[in-house]
Image (cartoon, coloured by chain):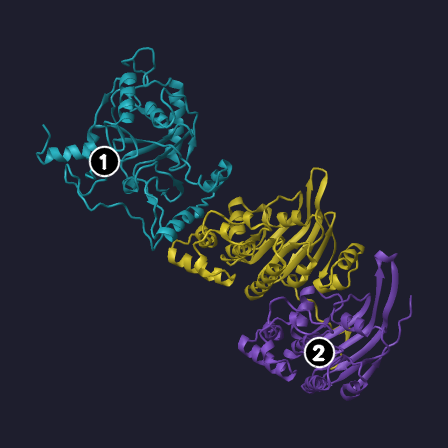
Chain colours: A yellow, B purple, C cyan
Amino acid sequence: MSRLDLADVSPIAEEAPLLDVQGLTKLYGGRVGCEDVSFQLWPGEVLGVVGESGSGKTTLLNCLAARLEPTSGTIHYRMRDGEMADIFALSEPRRRLLTRTDWGFVHQNPRDGLRLSVSAGANVGERLMAVGARHYGAIRAAATDWLDKVEIETQRIDDLPRDFSGGMQQRLQIARNLVSNPRLVFMDEPTGGLDVSVQARLLDLLRGLVRDLGLAAVIVTHDLGVARLLAHRLMVMRGGEVVESGLTDQVLDDPQHPYTQLLASAILQA
Amino acid sequence: MTELLRIIDLEKGFTLHNQGGTRFEVLNNVNFAIEAGECVALDGPSGVGKSTLMRAIYANYMPQAGHVLIRHDAQIVDMVGAPPRLVLEVRRKTLGYVSQFLRAVPRVSALDVVAEPLRALGTDIETARQRAADLLQRLNIPERLWKLAPATFSGGEQQRVNIARGFAAPYPVLLLDEPTASLDATNRSAVQGLIEEARKRGAAILGIFHDREVREALATRLYPMQTAETA
Amino acid sequence: MMDGTSATAATTTGYNFAYLDEQTKRMIRRAILKAVAVPGYQVPFASREMPLPYGWGTGGIQVTASIIGQADVLKVIDQGADDTTNAVSIRKFFGRTTGVATTERTIEATIVQTRHRVPETKLRDDQIIVYQVPVPEPLRWLEPREAETRKMHALSEYGPMHVKLYEDIARYGRVTTAYDYPVMVDGRYLMRPSPIPKFDNPKLDMCPALQLFGAGREKRIYAVPPYTSVKSLDFEDHPFTIESWDEACAICGSTESFLDEVITDDKGGRMFVCSDTDYCGERRKESGDEPA
C-alpha cells in the first residue's frame, strides 16, 4: 500500500482532444510544404511550432487553420456539441463560421488581421456583429472591455488602428480575435517585428490570457525564447517534417535530435 | 510511512550529435524511494550527476530507461514517458522544483512571480499574494522590490525570489537544487526553516546541499551517488 | 405587360419595338424571372450598349424595354420630378421607340421608371417600378473582390455591414448614411435600394408593386417581388429612422413628403418644396389651389 510499485501505475486517462491531426501533408507541386504531421491538442494547451524559415511551420499553421487545403491527411476538431468534426468535410458555411467564432487567427503583421480604416472599437466588435449582435451599446461595452484587457486605453476606442504603434496594433488584433470567446487560436509569429520591450509586454499579456481563458493555441515562432515562455509543448520542424516533439523545457534543455540540438545551442543566453 | 517518490533503474546519458556523436553516461542504476516527511540529500562529488538526476525526475531531461514513480492525488504516475500534459499536471499540483536560477517572465512583479504557483492551483489572487508576501518577508526581500520585476534584481535577491516561489504551493514532493548556495547566514537559516516546515507537514524532499552544516541539519538520510560506468 | 413583343407601332422606324431586339429582351426577362424568384439576389445579365451613356439609366432602360407592352402607360421620374433632363430623355426615348402612352401621374402609370426616388403616392399591385442602379453591390466598400462578395452573399455573412453603421454611430452619434441605405430583403439577401433617400426605404417594405432594379454598367438585375419584407439595417438601440423637416412644402403644405431645398435668390432666400412633382401638383388640385 505505502510502497510505490510499477504494477500500480495508473492508466493514462483517455481524454478527448480538442484537435486531432493525422498524417497532414501539403505539397506544392513536387515541393514539400509539410509532410505527414500528426498530433493532438487538448483544451488549455499551447503548442509551439518552431523551426527556421522554410521549415514548413507556416504552411502547417495555414492548413490547421483551414486557410489552405492539405494534399492529404485529416484534421478533426471537437465542436462545442462534442462532435469530432472533420474540418475539410464540413460545409463551407459551417467551416467559415467556425473559423470566425470558435477559432482565432493572429497574423504576424497586424495589418493582415485588422481593418485599418475602421475604428479600434469596430475592429473588436466585428466578430460580435458577424454572429448577430445588434445592440450598439452592448457591442461597444464588449469592445471597451477587450481594449482594457489588452491594455489599450479605452478612450482610443474611436481611433483608427493605422494611428497605433505596432505593439498596440498587435494587441488590438488579439482583442479582435478573442472577443468571440474562441477555444482555439492560431498565431503566426505574434511577436515578430516588435521591439524587445514591446515583445515582453505582449508575451506577458498572451500568457495571462491563455491561462485565464483556458485557450488552446498553436503558436508558430522561430524564437525559442518566445516558445519557452508561451508553449507547454513544442514541435520542431525541419524540411516540412516534425523532427522532435515533447514538453517545451525538455525539448529545449535536453534535445534529442541533431537538428534540435543545433537549434537549442544557437540560443543567446540572456 | 507512505512513499511519495520512487526511482527505479534510472538511466540517463547524452549524445552530442553536433560534436561527432559523442556519447556519455551520467546516471545508471539509480534506485531509491522517499517517504512523506523525509529529506534525502544527494551525496557525491560535483559532476556525479546530482542536478541531472533532479532534472530527470522533473522530466526536464528525458531518461533513456527506468521509471520515476510519483504519488499524484489518487494516482501513481510514471514521469518517464508520461504525456506532456500529465507531466505539467504533476508539476502543477504535486512536484515542486527549486532550480539554481530564476527564469523570470519579463514585466511580472516579484510578488506575482511568487504567487503564480498558487494561482495555478486556483487559489484566489488575494490569498496567493498574501502567502507570497509572507514568503518574501521571511526571505528578507525589501518590500519596495515586491512590485518590481525580478529581472532587475541582484543575483542573491533573484535566488531568494526563486526559493519563495518554490515554497509558495504546498507540494507533496519537493526537489531542491542547492537552495542555500551563496546565501548569507540569516537567509540560509530562513531557507532552512522553510525546508524543515515543509518536511514536517509531510513533504518528501530530495535535495542537493553543498554546505555540510546545512546538509547535516536538514537531511534525514543520504543517497550516495557514484560516477556512472560509461557504456 | 409583355404583350407587346410583336408590336409594330413604333413611331421611329427602323428599330424594333422598345429598341432592343427580341432575343435580348428574352435574355433580360429570364434574368428578371430569376431575380423575382430569389428576392434581393443580383442576377448577372448581358447588358447591351444603349444610345445613352452609362450613368444615365441604361440598366433601368433595358429592364423597362424588356417588360413594356403596347397597353402600358409609362412614367419616368428623376429625383421625383418628371421634368428633369434624365426623365425627359428617357420618356422621349420610349415614346419614340414604342409609341406607348406616357404620363406624369403616378396613379395612371403601369410602369414607373425612377432614378433616386420612390413616388409619394402608394403603388398598387398592378404597377411595376423600375429603379436605375449605379452600383448594385452593397458589400463593395469593404470587399473589392467580386468572388468574395458573392461568397459572402451565399453564406449570409453580413456582419461587416453593421461595422459601417457602428462607425457612423461611434463618430456622429447616429447613422449618417442618408441615401442608398442598405436593406435586407426577405430576411435573406442584403441589397442596395439604389440611391433613393432613406426616407423612401419604408415604401419598399411589403410594397404591392413589383420592384425591379437594373444596373447597366455593372450588368446586374435584381428584384423585390410584391409584398416582400424589406428591412433597413439598424441596431436595437439605434433603430432606423427617416428624415423629417421642420418646414412644410411651400407649395402644397405637405408635412409628409420628401422635401427639396430650393434657393430662391442670392441673398440667402430659400424654400422647401416636395421633390415629387406629381404628388405636389395633385395635392394642390385637391385643395382647389391649382395654378392657372
Name the residue carrying label 2: B173
| Residues packed near mark 2 inside 10 Å, few (<14), some (14 to 19) or many (20 plus) | many
State the quadrant of the N terminus of chain A. Answer: bottom right
Snapshot quadrant of residue A2: bottom right
State the quadrant of the C terminus of chain A. Answer: bottom right
Q: What whole-number distance in Å separates the C-alpha atoms at marks 2 and 1?
A: 86 Å
Residue A101 position in % (x across, y down): 51, 53
Left or right: A102 in relation to B10: left
Name the residue carrying label 1: C275
Q: In front: C150, or A148? A: A148
Snapshot quadrant of residue A44: bottom right
Q: How many marks?
A: 2
Q: Mark 1 lies on which chain?
A: C
Residue C184 position in % (x across, y down): 37, 43
Q: In front: B17, or C157? A: B17
Looking at the rendered structure, the kind of residue marked 2 is Val
Q: In front: A66, or A266? A: A266
Looking at the rendered structure, the kind of residue marked 1 is Ser
Residue pictured at 57% horizontal, 53% vertical: A106
Residue pictured at 76% horizontal, 68% vertical: B80
Circle 2 or circle 1, nearest the eye:
1
Looking at this rendering, what residue extends furthest in the left direction? C288
The numbered dot on residue C139 is: none
Left or right: C70 in relation to B112: left
Give the secondary structure at mark 1. Answer: loop
